[in-house]
Image: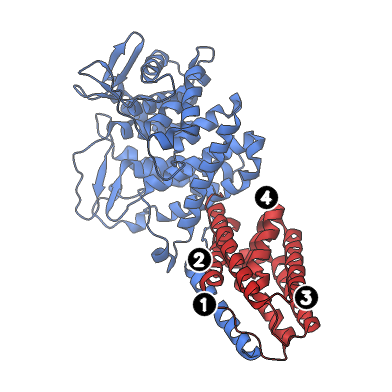
């Protein structure tokens, strides 16, 4: 037998224990500080300032910096070079035209390394190295954004060449092959990339927007079908859906073409994948830092913001996803505010060279160029939402 | 199951009517009044779901994940744990009301309100109340009551896991 008083006490103790455990774990508060459109824009500018200030005369960017040791290791990544250039052009398109010259220097670096791979097809790499699909794709998106920003068609032939290369890497079932081997002068049939497939889809979709009627959409649809329905399982990617912000860019580009239900289903699951990452990160305050590991690097969290920014556009244009639009925008703004708060300001410099720290995001002591690239892009999309200018 | 039906089932399972079977000398009328008072209090709390979410600074999907965890853990306890001790004679009304205000019932009502609206939560609480009273009136054998309680515990684990996944798969 249990007395009423004891039952009350047991219930009270149960509530206190359940409440306390929940509050420091799953129900930890989600902290999202306020962010204005001006602050989001300033954050993007500061990030691109870091990229451009530390650019080398040959057009390459500073790749890696350790602010405790002062080391700048002599390593580089061509795909990230192209991606970073794309982000700088995005800022140019957002009105910051003073960065055009720097982005063009980075473009020249790529153009100087172009080689032909077949009739009307070509891409770029360091001399003697195999060609990478991602490098071609992000060079294409860079030039296409430049074209939109400047109305300058000077690189249209290069774009068609890059498009020809990308389509040459495509299998009929939509699978994209990551490498083009110099030794065989042909695509490597074995190698795929969790990043390059989405990058190529976005580039090819943009090519269709720039050059309608040339048939680029015919190459884009099979890639989207593959990504939306089979890619994660075939390539054994985890988590699922693979949080692919490049696919989100692609969906935003293609939404006005008329997406199938399987594409919008994929967009919905992708939005959830990005959304839960922001919610989880927002719970990383106080003891939440222990219960909600790990802290993500700027590059990783920036891709989440990019993905949300693009999926917000998709939701705004496709009524099947309209119920998600407010939540997506809310997560984008929350995540952007949290990331902006982690960006190094002038007051937070600890090393002798402020130009290597201000505007950057560090994980531990290290920052990599894409730690600035992805957040800069994400901040631009947050700015558009905050200022009511979402396309 | 549609969203509203799933929401009602969630509340009924989180309430776990078989776990509230009466004590041997129970006053059925007093007990039913206590359950109704408890259900009304839970409904009142659920009506304040939005302010509660604001106060806690959590989003609806985060609440859903937490609710799923609580319901699944209580389901585990119902499935594997000892049977509840019967109440002492007297105090049936208070005991019933307090039993209703359990963490799984309250958090289920909150998350159902956040996802499907307050009316769905109220309907779920009403159904749970009716099922409990009806079960009590039938005076099930003790063994049958225990089996039902454990079966509901198993259902609570399944529903809890599905809520966790739904929370994770929400924006």
In the rendered structure, the answer to whether residue A118 lies left or right of residue A211 reads left
Cα separation between marks 2 and 3: 42 Å
Question: What secondary structure is found at the residue carrying circle 1?
Answer: helix
Q: Position of residue A61 (x, y in %)?
A: 28, 36
Q: Residue at x 44, y 24 (%)?
A: A174
Rendered hue of chain A is blue
Do discs 1 and 3 share a chain?
Answer: no
Mark 3, Cα crowd under 10 Å, few <14 / some 14-19 / many 20+, is: few
Front residue of this view, candidates A351 and B164: B164
Q: Quadrant of the C terminus of chain A?
A: top right
Q: Which residue is mark 4?
A: B1
Q: Closer to the observer: label 2 or label 1? A: 1
Q: Residue at x 56, y 67 (%)?
A: B75
Q: Closer to the observer: label 2 or label 3? A: 3
Do discs 4 and 1 share a chain?
Answer: no
Q: Residue at x 74, y 75 (%)?
A: B136
Q: Closer to the observer: label 4 or label 1? A: 4
State whether residue A222 is above or below residue B136: above
In the rendered structure, the answer to whether residue A88 lies left or right of residue A259 reads left
Residue B137 disc label: 3
């Amino acid at each position: 037998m249990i007395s009423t008083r004891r039952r009350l006490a047991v219930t009270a103790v149960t509530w206190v224990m359940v409440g306390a455990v929940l509050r420091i774990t799953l129900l930890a508060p989600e902290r999202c500080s306020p962010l204005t459109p001006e602050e989001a824009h300033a954050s993007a500018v500061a990030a691109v300032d870091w990229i451009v200030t530390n650019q080398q005369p040959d057009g390459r960017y500073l790749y890696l910096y350790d602010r405790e040791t002062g080391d700048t290791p002599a390593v580089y990544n061509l795909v990230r070079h192209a991606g970073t250039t794309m982000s700088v052009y995005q800022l140019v398109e957002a009105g910051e035209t003073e960065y055009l010259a720097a982005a063009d220097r980075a473009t020249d670096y790529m153009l100087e390394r172009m080689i032909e791979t077949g009739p009307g097809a070509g891409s770029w790499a360091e001399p003697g190295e195999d060609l990478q699909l991602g490098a071609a794709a992000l060079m294409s998106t860079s030039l296409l954004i430049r074209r939109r920003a400047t109305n300058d068609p000077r690189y249209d032939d290069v774009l068609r060449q890059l498009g020809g290369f990308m389509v040459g890497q495509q299998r009929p079932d939509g699978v994209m092959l990551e490498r083009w081997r110099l030794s065989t002068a042909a695509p490597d049939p074995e190698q795929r990339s969790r990043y390059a497939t989405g990058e190529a889809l976005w580039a090819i979709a943009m090519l269709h927007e720039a050059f309608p009627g040339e048939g680029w959409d015919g190459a884009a649809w099979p890639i989207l079908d593959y990504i939306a329905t089979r890619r994660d399982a075939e390539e054994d990617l985890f988590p699922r859906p693979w949080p692919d912000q490049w696919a989100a860019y692609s969906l935003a580009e293609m939404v006005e073409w008329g997406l199938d239900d399987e594409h919008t289903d994929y967009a919905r699951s992708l939005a959830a994948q990005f959304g839960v990452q922001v919610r989880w990160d927002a719970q990383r305050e106080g003891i939440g830092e222990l219960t909600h590991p790990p802290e993500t690097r700027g590059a990783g969290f920036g891709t989440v913001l990019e993905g949300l920014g693009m999926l917000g556009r998709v939701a705004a244009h496709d009524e099947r996803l309209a119920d998600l639009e407010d939540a997506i925008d809310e997560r984008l703004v929350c995540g952007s505010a949290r990331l902006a708060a982690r960006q190094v300001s002038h007051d937070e410099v600890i090393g002798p060279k402020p130009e290597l720290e201000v505007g950057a995001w560090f994980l531990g002591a290290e920052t990599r160029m894409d730690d600035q690239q992805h957040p800069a892009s994400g901040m631009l999309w947050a700015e558009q939402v905050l200022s009511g200018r979402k396309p | 199951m549609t969203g509203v039906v799933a929401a009602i089932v969630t509340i009924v399972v989180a309430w776990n009517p078989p776990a509230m079977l009466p004590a041997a000398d129970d006053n059925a009328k007093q007990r039913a009044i206590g359950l109704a008072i408890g259900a009304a209090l839970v409904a009142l709390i659920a009506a304040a779901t939005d302010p509660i979410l604001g106060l806690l600074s959590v989003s609806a999907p985060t609440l859903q994940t937490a609710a799923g965890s609580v319901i699944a853990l209580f389901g585990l306890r119902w499935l594997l744990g000892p049977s509840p001790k019967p109440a002492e004679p007297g105090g049936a009304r208070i005991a019933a009301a307090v039993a209703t205000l359990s963490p799984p019932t309250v958090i289920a009502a909150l998350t159902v309100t956040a996802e499907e609206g307050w009316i769905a939560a109220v309907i779920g609480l009403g159904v749970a109340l009716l099922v409990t009273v009806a079960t009590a009136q039938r005076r099930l054998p003790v063994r049958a009551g225990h089996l039902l309680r454990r079966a509901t515990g198993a259902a609570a684990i399944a529903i809890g896991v599905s809520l966790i996944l739904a929370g994770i798969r929400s924006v």
